[in-house]
Image: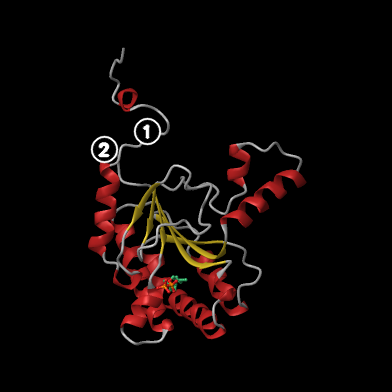
Amino acid sequence: MSDLPRHVAIIMDGNGRWAQARELKRIEGHRAGADAVRRITTRARERGIESLTLFAFSTENWQRPKDEVRGLWGLLIDFLKSELTTLIKNQIGLRLIGDPGPIPALAQHQLNKVIKRTSGSTQMTLNLALNYGAKAELIHAFEQLKKNDQPIDEKNVERHLYTANQPPVDLLIRTGGEHRLSNFLLWQAAYAELYFVDTLWPDYSDADFDRALNDFRQRERRFGRTSAQLNNEVTP
Ligand code: FPP
């Protein structure tokens, strides 16, 4: 049995299929997905999760149709505007993980504002992965170490990741029925418990999230050791 996860990461997949099933435009699926973000952020906070990391836009997502890309950034701006007071009230600090450079100026402006206004929060960190790719993150960390002539060891690499000073990912959830990591948190999730669910992200409920947390608590996390070692049993 494990304790509750300290850090939960989610690959929010299935918005497009949710919309398609209702003969709606894909952006409507993302809009419903943004509501699920609100729901699950609140639930994670209620459950005492320290860090929640959501994969909202990958470095590969720029290849999607222009309208969809524009719509996604618009939804993010709406989300940031509507959630600021709730984040402050619930003591949730926002962080961006990803390369901010190519993010549209208006979205950057709102992000910076919310990050600044929530920076003193003490209860939970909400990491939004935007223009994020794990390989690029690692290359960036290695380059920083090389530039500063620092040794490449675990502590130093972690200091240069976007998630510096946060616990490693304990539980990684992917909705939407696909079973892959899609270049997400490859370092931080090295020992994460993986949890895949068919539910499409807009339908993902509080109860679904609780089910994932309960499943996590049943897992035996051995980190390379034996079950007997973990239970302090004497083995021949
Ligand atoms: C994957 O579904 C989802 C995304 C690429 C974007 C996630 C965005 C949101 C949840 C909404 C906006 C975010 C915030 C933080 C307000 P997909 O489009 O690949 O779904 P499909 O596999 O069914 O096509």
Decide if residue 34 is in sight here. no
Q: Is 149 displayed left or right of 62 in the figure?
A: right
Furthest-top residue in this view: 236
Decide if residue 173 is in sight here. yes
Q: Amino acid at mark 2?
A: Met
Q: How is the image coloured?
A: secondary structure
Q: Position of residue 151 (x, y in %)?
A: 70, 36
Q: Position of residue 160 (x, y in %)?
A: 62, 48
Q: Which residue is more in the foreground, 34 or 113? A: 34
Q: Secondary structure at mark 1?
A: loop
Label 2: how many Cα within 10 Å (few below 14, some 14–19, many 20+): few
Quadrant in which residue 2 is drawn: top left
Residue 1: numbered disc: 2
Q: Residue at x 68, y 47 (%)?
A: 142
Image quarter hosting the C terminus: top left
The yes-or-no answer for disc 1 within 8 Å of ligand 1 is: no
Number of numbered callouts drawn: 2
Q: Is residue 225 above or below residue 117?
A: above
Q: Position of residue 188 (x, y in %)?
A: 50, 47
Q: Is 20 displayed left or right of 161 in the figure?
A: left
Residue at image mark 1: 222
Q: Earlier in the sequence, mark 1 or mark 2?
A: 2
Q: Amino acid at mark 1?
A: Arg
Image quarter hosting the N terminus: top left
Label 1: how many Cα within 10 Å (few below 14, some 14–19, many 20+): few
Q: Is residue 236 above or below residue 85?
A: above
Q: Is residue 197 above or below residue 147?
A: below
Give the alpha-carbon distance from disc 1 to disc 2, as whole Å: 11 Å
Q: Which residue is more in the foreground, 89 or 206? A: 206
**Where is ligand 1, by quadrant?**
bottom left
